[in-house]
Structures are given as C-alpha cells and as structure tokens.
Image (tube, rainbow, N blue to C red):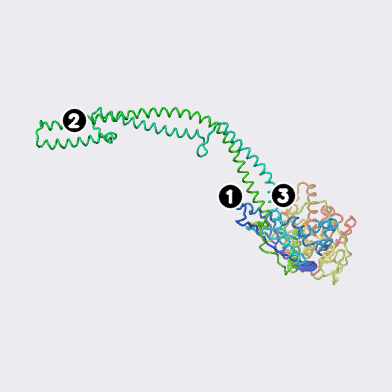
Amino acid sequence: MAGHNELTRDVDIDIGGLFSNIWKRKRLILFLSALAGVAIFIAMNSISPRYKSTAQLIIEPRESRFTRVQQQNGGVNANEFDAAAVLSQVQIILSDDIALNTIKRLDLAGTSEFGNSKEGSLLTDLFISAGIMSEPLEISPGERILKTFKSRLQGYSIDSSRVIELTFWAKDRNLAKEVTNTIADEYLLLQKRSKLETDSDATKFLEPEIAALRIKLRSAEAKVAAFRSNSDISIGNNNALLATQQLSELSTELSRVRSQASAADAKVQSIRTILQTGASIDAIPEVAASPLIQRLRERQVQLQAQISELSTTLLPGHPRLQGLKSQMSGFQKQIRRETRGILASLEGNVTIVRNQEQSLLRELSRLKAEAARVGEAEVELRALEREATSERELLQTYMTKFREAAGRQSNEYLPVNARIISRGYLPTESFYPKTVPYTIAGATVAAILSMVGILVMALISGKAFVAVNRPGTSRSEENDHTQMSFNATSQQPVNEIAPLRPIDNATQSDLATPQPGEVKYPQVSGEENKNNISVSLAAQAILGMGKVRIAVVSPGGDEGSVSTWLLAETLAKAEKTVALMDMTGSGITTRQFLGDNSLPGIWDMLAGSAEFTQIINKSKIPYLSILPVGTSRPADANLALERLTHLVDALTEGYDYLLIDCGMADLNGLSNVVRKDSLILISKVGTSMAKTIEDELINNGYGETITFHPSRKEMESLDNLAA
C-alpha cells in the first residue's frame, strides 16, 4: 500500500457504509414496521367512530334603519365588528354558561355518552395508572360532563372575515348535530338577553338621573334670570347686550357724521377759493344745482343773444346796447351774491355737523363706561348660561336615550348583531379514527425510527466514520480519525475461553459468530498440522468472548506476525471494529498494511510529537484500523509508559477488539501493554518454543493464553490479505 506523508488527517462520515448497514438489517426494520402497523390497526379498530357537525355564524349589524339607535357619528361603531370583537364572540360561544345551558336543554346527563361514570379506554386507563390523568370519579358528575363537553367543542374565526365556525363531535351522529345547532341558538338567545338586560339597566339608571337633572336645570335657569335682573343688563337683538349694541351703532353714526363734516368743510374751502380767485363758479356743484342761479344763467344767455343780435345793426355806444350790457353786469353780480349765500349756508351746515359730532362723542364716552360695566357682569352671566345650557343638553340626551331604551323594552323586536348562515348538518362519515392512514403513518414512523436507531448506533460505535486525506497526500485511501477519550478508569473484563482442541484447515462457514460462551469447532485433517489451532478457530473463540484486549506474541520474529494479520482480517470480516497496534521492533505490520514504515505512529505519540488522531490509519479491509509503530523515541520513559497505558485503555474502550502485535516481546515488555486478565496469543510460526513460552506466561499469572498457527488454506490466502 502507498504510504502517508502527512501527520494530520480529517474525519468524514461513510455514507455508503451507513446505508449498507441499514440494508443489512432490512428484515429487522420490516419486522418492526409491520409490528407497529398491526398494533396501530388493532388499536384504531378498537376505537368507536366519532362524528363531527359544523355550524357557521356571521357577526354583522342586524338593526333596521328604522329601529337603529342614532349615534353621534350617524353610523355603526366600527369597533364592534373588528377582529378583536369577533374573537371575543368566539370565547363567548365557548363559555361555560352556553355549555351548561346546552347540557341542560338537551339533558346530556341522561345520554349514554355523557351519563357514564367515565369514558373507558385502554389508553385512558394507562394514563390514569401512570398519574398523567386524574381519576374521573374523583370529580363531580356535573364537572365531568362539562369537561367532556368542552373537550369536544371547538370554535374559531375564519381569517379575514367575521364568520365564526363551531364544531362538535360525538359518537352519536344525531347528537353531534343537535348539540351544534343548540349551541348556536343558545348564543343568539344569550345575545338577545344581554341586549334586553342592557336596555333595562339603562332605564333604571336614566330615570333618577333625569329627575335630578330637571331640578338642576331649573336652578341654573333661575340663577341666570336673577343675575340678569340684579345687574341691570338689558338684552338687545340676537341675544346681545343692549349697551354693546348701542355702542356699536353710535360708533357707526359718529363715523358717518365725521365723514359728512369733512365733506362739507371741503366744499366750503373749495367755494372760497373760487370766489377769491375769480374763477368760474360753474364748477361748484351746489351753485350749478341752485334753481335761482340756473334762472339767472338763462336770463344772462338771453341778454347775451340780444346784445350780439343788436351789435350787427347798432353802434357800440347805442343806448339800447348800453342798457343791455348794464343788465348783463347786474346778472353777474347777482349770481356771485347767490354763490356767497350758498357758501354761508354750507358754512352753517359745517357748524351744525361739528356740533353733532361733539354730541356723539359725549354719548360715546357714556356708552363706553356703561359697556365696561355690563361686560364685567356679562362674564358671570355667560358662565351661568353655559351651566344652564349644559344641564339642558344633558337632560335632553338622557330623555332621548330613556325613551329609546323604554321603547325597546316594550317591543319583542331585539335583533342581535349575529346570525346563523349555516346550521349543523347530520354527518354521514366519521372523522376519526382513520384506520388506514394512521396504520401507514405508524408503520412509516416505526421504519424511520428503526433506521435512525441503526444510524445512531453506527455513529456511537465509530463505524460511521472514515478518515480522508488532505490534498497532497500520497495515499488514495481514507484514514480513520475516530475520536476517543483516554479514560483508563473503565476496563472490560475478558470472558472465559472454552477449551480448544487441535485443528487443521478451516472452512468459510467456521467464521460465523457463535453465541457468547459457545465455540463451534471446524473439522480438520492433515497429520503435519494436527497439533495446531488455526487462526479461524482462535477468531471464533474471541468472537464468543465479546469485547477483549488481545496481545499476540511472535517468538519466531517478524515471520510470526502473519498470524496476527490473518487474525485481524478474520475479526474484521465478522463486522467487528478492530484496532491493530504495531509494537514490533521492525514495523513489519505497518509495512504489510500501509506500505510505509515512516508514518507517524505509536512512538511519536508517546514522544509527544503526534496527536492521537494522527496515528490511526484505515486499511483497505473494512472495520480494520492500523496504528503504525512510529519513528520517534520518547525522552521520558515513565511519561511514555503512562501515555501508552492511556492509549491502550482508550482503544480497548473504543473498538470491539484491540489487537497488539507484540513481536518478540518478553515478559517485562508484555506487562507494559496488557493486564493479567488479557488474552495472550502465541504464534507458532517460525518457532518451536511456543509451548515453553506459554507455560512461562501461565506461571507468571497470564492464565488466558492460546498458541495458534495458520492453516494451509489460511497461509495460501496471505497473498491477498493487504495488496
């Protein structure tokens, strides 16, 4: 075999080996699955069939628009029909009150299902015996019936809807239907009674409250009237204070007078300016609008026309023309006198408006003082009015609610916010037990658990692990890196060995594993080997012992190690995990199985230069691991011996068989790796001193010793042992 060049290796799980292990135990798996299936089938057939009936209710407003109580928002409160409200209604349906009413209404205590002392079953009896369940007879019949009833009842809301679904199962299909429908009816009846009780409680509460509010309202209104009378507060239009209204009106009048005075003063100043500058007075609206001035202007126009007409026939100095011009001048003076009269009239109006303004200012000052006084009293008056208004509104609200509650009490129309949309039907098929599916499922689970158990045992025993090389290693096969603990406190005693007799060649059938304490001896022939115990017979004896530590001594040197190799192969082929330690001086066993004598091994670990997992190597033979001899030598002999003891104990605990190839070890060397109760095998290959050494070992306390020699057939198979 190719050698190893690395000191460290990784561990992987042998998936193929795990499945192979399961396949080898397929009959056991099939037996356990069939056994579980039959048991479940019998158990399911022993259970009485159960029938389930289902009803559905919807939570929605059921009030007519003609009878709906008016709310401030004018509609239905959305919180009454949200998800939380629907879940609350589910809990009401599942409440004890509805359950007890249903039990009483249907007289379930007198039925066979609920009237018995208990519902007997093998499983229930087992639970009661184990203390998991309480004895049904220890509780009262009513509590027992209620508990049984609620265990059969289920209610839940359907997602994204206000629909509630309730189900009930019973052994009697008619009973299942009746209970389901009765629960729905009892729920609606409970809701109706709840509304009636609410309205009744409302009238009882509102009646004395209304009487008290009437008294409070009368008192509040009396306080308002008394305060208004004592404080001399007069009310004007729009329920406003008279002083405030007058002050507002006077302010408006004062503004109008001031505006009028300003306009009149402006006109006076304009007329004065025109008269002083000699400008045309026709631009003054008051002058142009005067009837006298208008007549003078007309007469002046007529004179001007006559003058113009006569000027064409008469000279300028003609007396008639002079007389007409003199009249024209008189008209002009008369117009100016009339204008001055209009100015005087306007000035008089300005004086009158100014006097009126002063009068209004004096009245305004008086009203301001009065408004201040009334304003202070108004604050308290408004407070009294607000209190009276509050009492009046509350009284009106209570009276409206009282009339609504009293009217609904006297009327049988009390719609609840729920209705049945699907009543419980008569079930035709039972929902439990489902014999065939449960049987198949139980058999499948049993098969799975059986396979899991086999896998767990393989993992615990280490058979599931296989070592793998890191990239760059020279070997293609994987190494075994099974982790083991160096625990020297637990030792496995060696079983008694049955007496052996000489054999020659062994057949393949002789490798079967015997029962503990029982050895099957093969038939042999041949005179030259009649005193030899073959490797196969020694293996059969070892297989009958169970877990054991085995040391093989080869007085003939390296030539005798062939017996160790054949024994290791025989035990491994019996599907037993075997650890083979190479303790020979030459490392012949390492070369035989691993092909490289320079691998890190036992001596390297004892010297502290290699880890435990680095020295375990997996051979081509399944279940066989090799521990090379190693190349280092420990500096501290005592520490090395302590580590060696721990190593041997750990391998004994972690493998079915620990096989130590001791080579030509003497008694002192042998005592370092084996105890007095260990099994000592002496290879007779290449030596005639095997019997002498066996006697010497027995005389020194090693009572379990066997001398053996490979048969001819076993020696012929040596070439194919570890290619």
The amino acid pointed to by label 3 is Ser
Mark 1 closeness class: few <14, some 14–19, many ≥20 residues within 10 Å: few
Task: Tell me the SS state at disc 1.
Answer: loop
Of pointers 1 and 3, the one earlier in the residue sequence: 1
Query: Which mark is on residue 609?
Result: 3
Q: Position of residue 385 (x, y in %)?
A: 58, 37
Q: Looking at the rendering, which quadrant does residue 455 occupy?
A: bottom right
Decide if residue 347 is on the left or right side of residue 83.
left
Q: Which residue is mark 2?
A: 329
Judged left or right of residue 449, residue 473 is left
Q: What residue did someone put label 1 on?
A: 73
| Residue depth check, mark 1 versus mark 3: number of the one nearer the observer | 1
Residue type (three-letter) at the residue carrying disc 2: Ser
For this rendering, which residue is in front, 275 or 630? 275
Residue 474 location (% of width, % of height):
66, 58
**Snapshot quadrant of residue 168:** bottom right
Q: Is residue 715 above or below residue 467?
A: below
